[in-house]
């Protein structure tokens, strides 16, 4: 269920609205996905802005509704669909009897891993470094050719037909925030959904939205010697597409198949709900089981809860899967504090709300209840002190909204290619 959303505008400034929401309209086949490369505005995603935008949106929604979201985990959907080596950071903040765990990407590890992978593939494929920009551009060009700024009734024919002349950019993004559950773990998850729907968005909050995920893939052709191999590659890609989409409630994926020269040759619509069945069908061809995938994810989340919460609030944990290994390691890298995962202004907001709701001295409590309350108050003071200490490292005079506006979460950004 969608509970909130936010946007990044054309300058990648944070906005607490749906101004970057766009709408799907079928692109023209035969379009050149390499056209406009020289003017491509590609966002630098190496900067680490943590999960500030996600937390700011949650905070503002809590102020609006008076309800505190209290899941087991708060994170971005992209972190739950990592299939290769990864490193993540996590911390625990206890506001109520159900402590929240916050998970973010270890950006330093990701940047280094991507550099190594690019160099290896460049060597294997004799690619030039500029080719990676070309590959990224093709995916975003497909999005540009497939989107319009409003529902079809409100868009002119000229706007639709001039999409191929628009400058390609991945600065603007739309992020949906949903409340969901995997196994025994409740979650609040943010995820970019390509800002695309094929009809108007319901005005009533919480109603299902017909979001569309847009992806590109190299075309493969029946009758060619490599058809079987290439079709299996696409089936395996569906695993990630399915996981990314179902986590944030996206019901449909539209794939644009491009030729080796970057020409858009065909489209295929995938219903997210039916992807596991469609991929399971070809037995003996490297198929996978969507249900088993979710069960495995649920077990991993249970393990994280048991490990992190057993040690109590505070401290920073590393969640790591090394290349070529199946096991996931969870170990502490900072004994106290919250690192940069949860910003001081969010911690202070949560502590403030707790005192407003419960008060430091509740009347009618028996002695045991008073002792328990005193213990919680002392714990809150300790956490407030940690938050204050972290706040001293922040730029003085900068308010909460400015910090959130500077945030950018590439984990929220699904790679368009």
Image: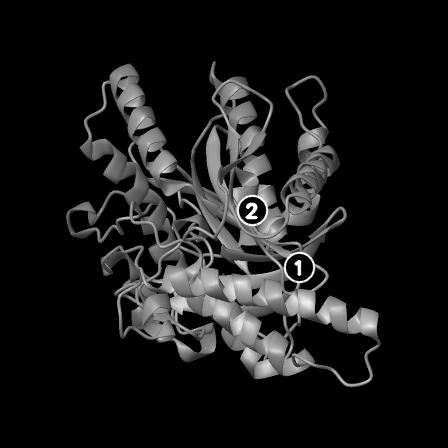
Question: Dot 2: few (<14), some (14–19), or many (≥20) neighbours within 10 Å?
Answer: many
**Mark with earlier residue (1, 2):** 1
**Image: 193 above or below 365:** above
Left or right: 391 with respect to 244?
left
Q: Position of residue 30 (x, y in %)?
A: 34, 45
- Most foreground residue, 188 or 156: 188
Q: Residue at x 35, y 55 (%)?
A: 49
- Most foreground residue, 355 or 198: 355
Residue pushed farthest front? 367
Q: Position of residue 166 (x, y in %)?
A: 24, 60
Q: Residue at x 53, y 32 (%)?
A: 83
Q: Position of residue 391 (x, y in %)?
A: 37, 64
Residue pushed farthest left? 38
Report which residue position mark 2 lands on.
244
Residue 152 in sight: yes
Q: CA distance from mark 1 to mark 2?
A: 19 Å
**Image: 233 above or below 357:** above
- Most foreground residue, 378 or 46: 378
In what quadrant of the picture does the N terminus appear? bottom right
Question: Which picture quadrant has residue 96?
Answer: bottom right
In what element is the residue under mark 1? Answer: loop
Report which residue position mark 1 lands on.
71
Left or right: 110 with respect to 274?
left
In what element is the residue under mark 2? Answer: helix
**Image: 27 above or below 284:** below
Instruction: Point out which mark residue 179 bears.
Output: none
Left or right: 347 with respect to 394?
right
């Amino acid at each position: 269920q969608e509970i909130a959303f936010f946007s990044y505008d054309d300058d990648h400034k944070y906005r607490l609205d749906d101004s970057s929401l766009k709408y799907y309209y079928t692109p023209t086949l035969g379009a050149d996905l390499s056209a406009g490369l020289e003017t491509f505005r590609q966002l630098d995603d190496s900067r680490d802005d943590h999960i500030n935008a996600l937390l700011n949106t949650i905070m503002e929604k809590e102020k609006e509704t008076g309800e505190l979201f209290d899941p087991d985990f708060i994170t971005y959907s992209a972190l739950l669909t990592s299939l290769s080596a990864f490193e993540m950071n996590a911390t625990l903040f206890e506001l109520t009897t159900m402590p929240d765990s916050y998970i973010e990407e270890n950006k330093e590890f990701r940047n280094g891993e991507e550099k190594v992978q690019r160099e290896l593939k460049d060597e294997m494929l004799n690619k030039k470094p500029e080719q990676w920009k070309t590959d990224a551009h093709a995916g975003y060009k497909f999005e540009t050719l497939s989107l319009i700024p409003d529902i079809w009734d409100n868009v002119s024919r000229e706007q639709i037909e001039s999409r191929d002349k628009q400058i390609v950019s991945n600065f603007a993004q739309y992020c949906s925030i949903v409340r969901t559950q995997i196994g025994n773990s409740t979650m609040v998850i943010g995820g970019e959904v390509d800002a695309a729907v094929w009809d108007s968005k319901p005005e009533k909050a919480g109603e299902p939205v017909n979001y569309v995920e847009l992806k590109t893939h190299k075309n493969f052709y029946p009758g060619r010697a490599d058809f079987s191999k290439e079709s299996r590659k696409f089936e395996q890609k569906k695993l990630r597409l399915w996981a990314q989409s179902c986590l944030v409630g996206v019901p449909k994926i539209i794939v644009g198949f491009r030729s080796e020269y970057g020409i858009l040759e065909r489209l295929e619509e995938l219903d997210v709900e039916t992807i596991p069945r469609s991929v399971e069908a070809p037995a003996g061809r490297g198929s996978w089981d969507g249900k088993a995938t979710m069960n495995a994810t649920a077990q991993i989340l249970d393990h994280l809860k048991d490990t992190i919460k057993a040690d109590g609030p505070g401290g920073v944990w590393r969640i790591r899967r090394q290349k070529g290994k199946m096991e996931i390691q969870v170990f502490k890298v900072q004994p106290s504090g919250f690192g940069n995962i949860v910003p001081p202004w969010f911690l202070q907001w949560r502590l403030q709300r707790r005192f407003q709701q419960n008060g430091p001295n509740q009347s009618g409590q028996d002695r045991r209840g008073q002792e328990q309350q005193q213990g919680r108050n002392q714990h809150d003071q300790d956490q407030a002190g940690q938050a204050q200490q972290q706040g001293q490292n922040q730029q003085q005079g900068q308010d909460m909204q400015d910090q959130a506006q500077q945030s950018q979460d590439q984990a929220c950004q699904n790679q368009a290619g």
